[in-house]
Amino acid sequence: MTDSDAIDLASMLCSRLCHDMLSPVGALSNGLELLAGEKDPEMRQRCFELLEQSAQISADKLKFFRLAYGAAGGFGDQVDVAEARAVIDALARDAKRVAVNWALAESRMSKPAVKVLLNFAHMGIEALVRGGTIDIGAEVRDGATEIVVRAAGARIAFDETIGAALEGNLAKDRLSSRTAPAHMLCLLAEDGGGGLQYRQTGDALVLGAVLPNG
C-alpha cells in the first residue's frame, strides 16, 4: 500500500465513523431542543429517556470504533476477548431483535483477529434488517486463529461490494466509506498471510477468516 492509498483508506474510515455517529448524536441534539421547550412532566421524562438511549448508543458505537479501527487494548499484542464480546452484545441490543450466540475458545486474541471478529459481527448485525441471530465462533487451531460469524434471519441485506472487498477482489476505484472497513480487514489478513471469505444465501450470511499466528 502506498502512502496515498493509506491516506485514502484513513479518510474513508473517518467518513464511515462520522456517518455512523451522525444518527445518535443528531438524536441527542434534537432531544435537547425538545426538552428546552417542553413543560409537560411526562413529556420531559420521555425526552430524558430518549436522551439516555441516544447517549448509550453513541457510547457503544465509540467503544466499537476504538477496538475495531483503533489501537485496541493499548500497546499489547493481545486483546481481552471479553471486551470485544461486551461491545458486540451492546451493538446487538441497540439494533433490537438481534440475538447473539457465542462460541469462543480463547480468552485473548491478537489485535488483527479481534478487529476481524468485531467487524464481521458488525457486518452481520447490519445485514439483519428484520432481526435474527448472530452465531460467533473463534478458536486457535494448527497455529492459526479461525473465525466464523453467521447471521441468519428473515431477510439478509449485504452489499456484494463489501464481500468483494473482503476477498480482495474490489477495484481500487470502487472503494468507498462503505467498503473501507472490509478493505482494511483484507489488508490485515494479507499482511499476516491469512485470508477472508464470505457466502450469502437467502436467509444467511457467513463470514470466515483464517489468520496465522505470527
Image (cartoon, rainbow, N blue to C red):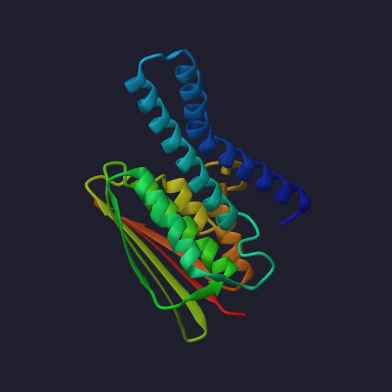
Classify residue 16 by image quadrant.
top right
> With 91 as the anchor, is 165 left or right in this view?
right
Along the viewing direction, whichever of 212 and 94 lies nearer the viewer: 94
Q: What residue is at 48 percent from the left and 86 percent from the top? A: 142
Question: Looking at this rendering, what residue extends furthest in the right direction?
Answer: 3
- Quarter holding the C terminus? bottom right
Q: What residue is at 56 percent from the left and 60 percent from the top? A: 186
Question: Looking at this rendering, what residue extends furthest in the left direction?
Answer: 154
Residue 50 shows in this picture: yes
Along the viewing direction, whichever of 185 and 56 lies nearer the viewer: 56
Classify residue 120 by image quadrant.
bottom left
Q: What residue is at 53 percent from the left and 73 percent from the top? A: 109
Question: Looking at this rendering, what residue extends furthest in the front direction?
Answer: 41
Residue 201 shows in this picture: no
Q: Position of residue 137 (x, y in %)?
A: 37, 70
Relative to 29, residue 171 above or below: below
Relative to 106, residue 67 above or below: above
Q: Position of residue 207 (x, y in %)?
A: 40, 61
